Amino acid sequence: MTDHRDLLAGLRAAVRGEVDFGTTARALTTMDASNYRRVPLGVVAPRDADDVAAALSVCRTHGVPVVPRGGGTSIAGQATGTGVVLDFTRHMNRLLSLDPRARTAVVQPGLVLDRLQEAAAPHGLRFGPDPSTHGRCTLGGMIGNNSCGSHSVAWGTTADSVRELSVVTPRGERLRPGRGWAGAPAGLRELVDGELARLRTGFPDLPRRISGYALDALLPEKGADVARSLCGSEGTLGVLTEAVVELVRAPRARALAVLAYADESGAAEAAAGLLPFGPLTVEGMAADLVPSSVDLPRGGAWLFVETGGDTDEEARARADAIVRAADVVDSLVVTDPARQRALWRVREDASGTATRMPDGTEAWPGWEDCAVPPARLGAYLRDFRGLLAAHGLRGAPYGHFGDGCIHVRIDFDLLTGPGVARFRSFSEELADLVVAHGGSLSGEHGDGQARAELLPRMYDARTVALFERVKALWDPDDLLNPGMLVRPAPLDANLRFAVLPREPVDVAFGYPADAGDFSAAVRRCVGVAKCRTESASGPAVMCPSFRATGEERHSTRGRARLLHEMLAGEVVTDGWRSTEVRDALDLCLSCKGCRSDCPVEVDMATYKAEFLHHHYEGRRRPAAHYAMGWLPVWLGWVARTRTAAVANGLASVGLLARAAKRLGGIARERGIPRVAGETFTRWWRGRRASPGDGALVVLWPDTFTEHLSPSVGRAAVRVLEAAGLRVALPPTLRPGGRVGDARSRSALALLTARRARVCCGLTYVSTGQLDRARTVLTRTLDLLEPVLATDAPLVVLEPSCAAALRTDAPELLHDDPRAARLAARVLTFAETLERYAPDWTPPPVNRPVTGQTHCHQHAVLGEEPDRRLRAAAGLTGDLAGGCCGLAGNFGFEKGHYEVSAACAEEQLLPAVREAPESAVVLADGFSCRTQLDQLAGVRGRHLAEVLAEALEE
């Protein structure tokens, strides 16, 4: 790399914000949400406009380009560059003022849209445009791309909501662009006056025309609006430091009409006809993007048409009128806000879910948002489908049907030369098709590198030359985001996949969803950044560490980017030994939230375990990996020697406890959990068996239930037997054990077999000790041979252990078919009762509940059976989402306490504090119960304990 020490020194001397040319900062900003990758020299996080001007001055002196960047969710490559990236999310992210009477707000470019919406909502106001990335996109990025969102049929594009901008030009001039030529650079007005005829005739009249510069906004009859002309300029003309935006009155009530059509073309042709009814949205999507679990009216494609009103009745009446006027196969009107949100999440997640075809094939952006006149949408879609078929490609169109704007991810092969050549030829032909329908190459997300090369197919040569002249007026040194919009880079250059290894990487997990290819698993992250939301909504979990720290490297996307660069070997050069990747993964809680909440199901918990496995291979591990990774061994020794009382006594002595925690790499703030005096299986051997005549179920004695909370196991046995089930434990002798042989003492068995215990391997997996985990799981499968020979399910009380058996075991032992058979047998406590005792009625508890759904339960196991069981027992209310923050060994490890506590304070602890005194505090996970105990002094209980207590009463 060229020596840029003078540049670095100059920036650090001139800028008060952070200047970071380190490996991590550069690796995190090589990509946005597009197909493109560029390696920057470094990242600057300016504190204010003075910092922006100073950074531009230093970079201009050194001839280094500058790329303004917001949330990094651009999908055309315009948020990547080879120079210095300006990160506005760190400091310049505030709402400066909000005037409800004037309906305006003053914002900084790094402000996330949802923060503005939250501030405006109490005044009955909102910002009109709302892209699906509203939880992480920034106002600066929205202005740079002229973003729109689903409500554009009612409230237009971002340009329609911008009143005035504050801009620093590349040569340091401070301007305030607005209407009436306000803030225009020298020479712009004269240039426009000489091209009035071209500006009046050379631009398509579309609601979603984003491609090129919006120079027609400078026409006198349009108010010579310089601010509007900058919207959609993709950071190529000036650097935004502040914006005055207009707000709209939000309807007090909303209804959602879901209109079903036979196919996508039918929905597309109907969309334009609904616009006279004044809907707030007309969004379309077809069956190939809708999960089968979503309850929609029968049909092959749907329009989501939202209506508003001052009352629920008024909003409903408008929705009903649209249903009556629409020629539909079927319809549904939804007025419940929670159900509306659930349906909108399906639409918002489409940008991620569309990146995987139904057969698992990868699909990519690149032609994400072409727009045609709404009346031409049906015909365009038929031609578009035909072009896909002609090239042997597949895609699932969806998007803003009311505005004629279509999103689609296409299964381009961007890994081989012939595949990239087909990507180019398809792009050229599609550009011609869009133009033939009177459309715009970009209808929302900008041209970037994906489409700028093709602008001459949409605009004539003199108009393209005019774009270059405007760029030269604003940025004569070509400092800002070069290669975008004018003099563009080729659309098939800088593809982010080109640097990845072509041969499979040697890994421990099987990665079945990615054909065993770790590179493909890492490629899953396309950068839509749902993990970067600053607050979790509803039951969502992902990504607790990002919400605690606010740092990109602690988001799922950030970690995936670092793994991508580790595989590439250009920025992160030491592979599996990388300290940058290790440090970024250090605060990953392995909550598995991303496995379900990420639209493309990135599984960072698995990637972390894989990385730790390789990183520490042949080397000494952190003390916590031995202290907590081998927890089943240490607790087994205590049980065999019957020294629980001794261990607890020593742990209660302050000096000894502090020494033990220091040796074990445990946070000093943590208390050491008490070991039970009698293990669960010892209690089991001494109890009087209940014969029962129902189905046989095998109760899994996980490490936590066995040694730390046997009361949960005892309660589960009580409830399962009360439901008429026959309960047994797994064998503990191999070979030759039998189901329920925890009492077995036959002389022959003791002579011919070895005693062992089943274990899910969770603690070894979470610390990346995968060789040990494989050994433990193989032993477990050997022990379970008699169980797998029956039809009996395995009832697992600890959610994290159930998740490990259901997912980690078959993925780690992908070469052992018994692991998949075991995974298929695993049931939660509630699933068991629902499936094997469907006629049993639980005892009435009739109390409200509080607490938190275990993160692994949410991500892997599902909570619906638990909800139904709670409802049947009269336990009312919902549990909080998020993660408790303890997350097995994570919260106990030295250096993690603050983040662990911050995660608990996000949802769990406030939910418990705000609950009524009569509420039952539910926490099925041992970690969750421990966190409640240590941070709030509250005793959480497993659902089995609550029901068992009710049975006694």
Image (cartoon, grey):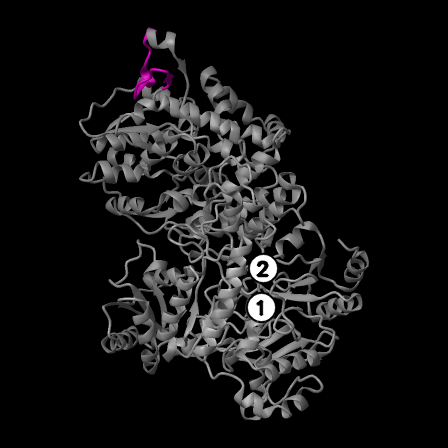
Contact between marks 2 and 1 (CB within 8 A): the answer is yes
Q: Quick one: 821 or 537, which is closer to the camera? A: 821
How many C-alpha atoms fall within 10 Å of the one at disc 2: few (<14), some, or many (≥20)? many
Q: Give the range drawn in magenta.
A: 732-747
Q: Which of marks 2 and 1 is nearer the N terminus?
A: 2
Q: Where is residue 444 in the image (x, y as percent from the top left)?
A: 49, 72
Circle 2: residue type:
Tyr
Q: Residue at x 50, y 81 (%)?
A: 101
Q: Which residue is drawn at 37% across and 62% down?
A: 341
Residue 128 visible, this orientation: no
When asked about the image quadrant of residue 701, the answer is top left
Tell me, yes or no, whether the highlighted magenta stretch contains residue 746. Answer: yes
Name the residue that disc number 1 marks.
448
When asked about the image quadrant of residue 287, the answer is bottom left
Residue 555 versus residue 477 in the image, above or below: above
How many C-alpha atoms fall within 10 Å of the one at disc 1: few (<14), some, or many (≥20)? many
Q: Quick one: 393 or 298, which is closer to the camera? A: 393
Residue 849 visible, this orientation: yes
Q: Position of residue 824 (x, y in %)?
A: 33, 36
Label 1 secondary element: helix
Majority secondary structure in the magenta region: loop
